[in-house]
């Protein structure tokens, strides 16, 4: 049988914190509203095809458009990770 010191494994865990700066893609929607005079017999199918909604009123119509805006934002945060040290003093680890 091996001595007690030859059968030990020491395991140590430590948490490391690093400050990291990352570029994160962002996305949001913007809505625009436009009031225009109503034209007799104006077609709305083309407007619907391009993602525009028309709301007819008595003397004018309202055009509502939704645009998706994509951008990049820089974020700086502390990031933690765990590291493990193994000290294998067994006969197999020597």
Image (spheres, rainbow, N blue to C red):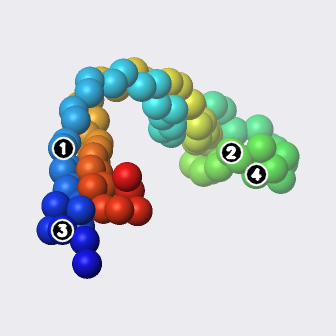
Of callouts 3 and 2, the N-terminal one: 3
Q: Which residue appears at 51% of the width and 37% of the height?
A: 27
For label 3, the SS is loop
Is residue 70 depicted above or below 52 in this figure?
above
The answer to whether the residues at label 4 and label 2 have Cβ atoms under 8 Å apart is: yes
- Answer with the quarter of the image where residue 93 lies: bottom left
Is residue 93 depicted above or below 66 in this figure?
below
Foreground residue among 74 and 40? 74
Q: As drawn, which residue projects farthest toward the front?
A: 1
Marks 3/4: CA–CA distance = 82 Å
Residue occupied by mark 2: 52
Of callouts 2 and 1, the N-terminal one: 1
Q: Residues within 10 Å of mark 3 (few under 14, many from 20)?
A: few
Q: Residues within 10 Å of mark 2 (few under 14, many from 20)?
A: some
Foreground residue among 56 and 79? 79
Which label is found at residue 68?
none
Residue 49 located left or right of residue 87: right
For label 2, the SS is strand
Of callouts 1 and 4, the N-terminal one: 1
Label tally = 4
- Answer with the quarter of the image where residue 68 lies: top right
Residue 37, position in %: x, y?
66, 32
Does any portion of residue 33 appear in the rendered image?
no
Residue 26 located left or right of residue 49: left
Residue occupied by mark 4: 48
Residue occupied by mark 1: 14
Residue occupied by mark 3: 3
Residue 39, position in %: x, y?
76, 38
């Amino acid at each position: 049988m091996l001595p007690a010191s030859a059968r030990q494994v020491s395991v140590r865990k430590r948490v490391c914190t690093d400050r990291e700066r990352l570029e994160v893609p962002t996305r949001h929607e913007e809505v625009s509203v436009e009031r225009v005079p109503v034209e007799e017999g104006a077609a709305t199918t083309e407007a619907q095809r391009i993602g525009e909604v028309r709301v007819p009123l008595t003397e004018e119509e309202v055009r509502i458009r939704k645009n998706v805006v994509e951008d990049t934002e820089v974020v700086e945060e502390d990031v933690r990770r765990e590291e493990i040290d193994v000290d294998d003093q067994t006969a197999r680890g020597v």
